[in-house]
Image (cartoon, grey):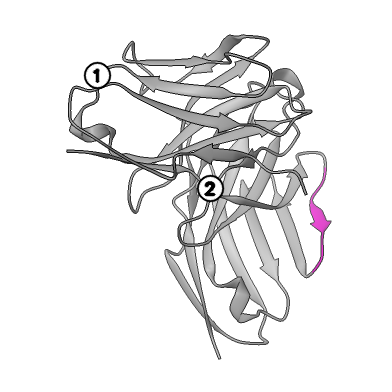
Amino acid sequence: EPEVTQTPSHQVTQMGQEVILRCVPISNHLYFYWYRQILGQKVEFLVSFYNNEISEKSEIFDDQFSVERPDGSNFTLKIRSTKLEDSAMYFCASSELGGAYSNQPQHFGDGTRLSIL
Amino acid sequence: GESVGLHLPTLSVQEGDNSIINCAYSNSASDYFIWYKQESGKGPQFIIDIRSNMDKRQGQRVTVLLNKTVKHLSLQIAATQPGDSAVYFCAESGNTGKLIFGQGTTLQVKP
């Protein structure tokens, strides 16, 4: 069964450094998402991406965050200058359809654990 | 505001019994609902979904019930097995695609 893959599984970074989290969505999917989960808390939406542009972003997704689809398979989340409170699990998800046709399940990767020191 | 929640943080059941996990949502404009299972160290795994024009949907050993009148969603797991032990999240979606997750219920299956 096709799956979303994320790398690395664990990233340790010094505060203030840039970090790039990588995702390979399911190949025929058109909508891509990033979510985060702080330890012991619920999963929170960060951003959705379609047709090479951001569709929607949350308040968490400030100007320190950016997303990119650099080629036909990868989808990345960049945090420019990390803060201690950025420590969390970051999940990538993809769906075949989305937006106004959002009645399609989003499939998640196993996440990247980001630890900011 | 938008919020999705679950009634109980932890549910403990005996192996072989049926489990019912509940969720309340507040956004009456939401029209799509999903249950996810999250095992330790893994991402949310899709279990079953339901659209707002339905009130019941069945899968393999799982049933989702939707009561739009009281904005309540439930997941029923038949003949619960040790492999069902995990955290279960409900999530809702409107017309933008983003998922709003509830807090999660930890299901513990006792042998």
Give the numbered dot on residue A110.
Answer: 2
Span shown in magenta: B54-60
Give left or right: position of A112 versus A19. right
Residue A9's disc number: none
Q: Position of residue A39 (x, y in %)?
A: 32, 50
Q: Position of residue B84 (x, y in %)?
A: 61, 72
Q: Would you name the residue on which mark 1 appears?
A: A81
Residue A81 or residue B36, whichever sits in front: A81
Marks 1 and 2 share the same chain: yes
User: Pointers 1 and 2 in contact (CB under 8 A)?
Assistant: no
Q: Residue at x 51, y 42 (%)?
A: B101
Number of marks in the image? Answer: 2
Would you call the spot at circle 1 few (<14 residues within 10 Å), some (14-19), or many (20 or more)?
some
Tell me residue B102's x, y (percent).
Answer: 49, 47
* Residue B59 lies within the magenta run: yes
Residue B26 showing in the rendered view: no
Spatial separation of the CA atoms under disc 1 and disc 2: 24 Å
Q: Nearer the viewer, residue A48 or A66?
A: A66
Quadrant where the image shows the C terminus of chain B = bottom right
Q: What percent of the width, then of the height, locates residue B49? A: 73, 47
A35 falls in the magenta region: no
How many other residues sit within 10 Å of disc 2, few (<14), some (14-19) or many (≥20)?
many
Task: From this view, report whether residue A80 is shown above or below residue A44.
Answer: above
In the displayed structure image, the side of residue B38 where residue B9 appears, left or right: left
Residue drawn 76% across the image and 62% down it: B63
Lower sequence index among marks 1 and 2:
1
The residue at 66%/46% (across/down) is B34
Position of residue A39 relative to residue B96, above or below, is: below
**Amino acid beneath label 2:** Asp
Residue found at the very far bottom of the displayed protein: B111
